[in-house]
Image: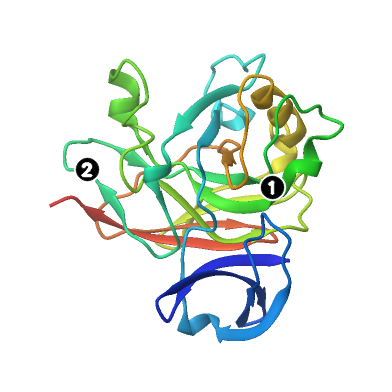
């Protein structure tokens, strides 16, 4: 099932996407729900970020093609992105005027179904609601020069996600593609993740309790490219859809 979070007639709802329409859910997808007959055309609603996480985590250096002669990590390299940096499909990524290089990072994103702690690889997938597309926007000069990545990864608008949560996706062999202005700049299968989804969940929940709606960005492949004023960045993940965001220089 594809699940959207959307705004229609001043009300925010979750819905099941069927073709070019969305049917409202009776409750959030993190609760018991039914699919109602209240239907909108997708063209008539505003798609929002697919959930409201209490926390966003991300995994660095998780594709060998992204290592650039660095040694592969021996355990997942985890960092935080702030919930206030999350934006949805079509929303504008603001390029801060004092950053020298702002890159897009195409990523598969895990969406957590319920409160969970100390998972194992054997039971981890039971706590996944589904997956969405994500862009781990990265200010490279800040990432290089700051003592940590607080603003390089979490400045406002630096965590685009969407357009949908796909609940019936096998995350182990799907293609992650990034495009800027229609030109493909990243493309690789999740087969090449160094740490797969169950491994990530086991590692993270050993130390951090995850809540319903929390998101984990699983890493980016290849050589991410820069986003400049006026560009449009698209993240496409096989089986989910396309997350598209315009880029604008801060005024």
Q: Is 68 drawn above or below residue 184 in the view shown?
A: above
Q: Is residue 232 left or right of residue 218?
A: left
Q: Is residue 123 left or right of residue 54?
A: right
Q: How many numbered marks does the figure carry?
A: 2
- The answer for how far apart the CA atoms under marks 1 and 2 are is 34 Å
The residue drawn where x is 78% and y is 35% is 124
Residue 7's tag is none
Asked whether 191 or 65 is in front, the reply is 191
Mark 1 Cα shell of 10 Å, populated few (<14), some (14-19), many (≥20): many
Q: Is 181 drawn above or below residue 119 in the view shown?
A: below
- Callout 1–callout 2 Cβ contact below 8 Å: no
The residue beneath circle 2 is 96
Asked whether 42 or 227 is in front, the reply is 42
Q: Residue furthest right?
A: 122
Measured as percent of width and height from the top left, residue 23 is found at 64, 79
Measured as percent of width and height from the top left, residue 237 is found at 62, 56
């Amino acid at each position: 099932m594809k699940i959207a979070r959307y705004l229609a007639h001043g009300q925010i709802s979750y819905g099941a996407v069927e073709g070019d329409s969305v049917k409202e859910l009776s409750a959030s997808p993190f609760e018991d729900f039914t699919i109602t007959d209240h239907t909108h055309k997708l063209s008539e609603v505003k798609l929002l970020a697919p959930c409201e996480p209490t926390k966003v985590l991300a995994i660095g250096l998780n594709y060998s093609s992204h290592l650039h002669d660095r040694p592969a990590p021996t355990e997942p390299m985890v960092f935080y992105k702030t919930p206030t940096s999350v934006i949805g499909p079509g929303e504008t990524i603001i390029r801060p005027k004092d950053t020298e290089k702002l890159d897009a990072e195409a990523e598969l994103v895990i969406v957590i179904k319920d409160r969970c702690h100390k998972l194992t690889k054997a039971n981890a997938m039971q706590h996944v609601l589904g997956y969405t597309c994500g862009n781990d926007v990265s200010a490279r000069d800040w990432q290089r020069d700051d003592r940590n990545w607080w603003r390089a990864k979490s400045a406002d608008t630096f965590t685009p996600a969407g357009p949908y949560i796909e609940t019936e996706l096998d995350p182990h062999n799907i293609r992650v593609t990034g495009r800027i202005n229609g030109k493909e700049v990243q493309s690789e299968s999740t087969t090449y993740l160094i740490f797969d989804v169950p491994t990530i969940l086991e590692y993270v929940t050993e130390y951090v309790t995850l809540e319903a709606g929390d998101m984990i960005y699983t890493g980016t492949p290849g050589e991410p490219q820069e986003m400049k004023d006026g560009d449009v960045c698209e993240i496409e993940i096989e089986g989910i859809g396309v997350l598209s965001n315009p880029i604008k220089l801060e005024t």
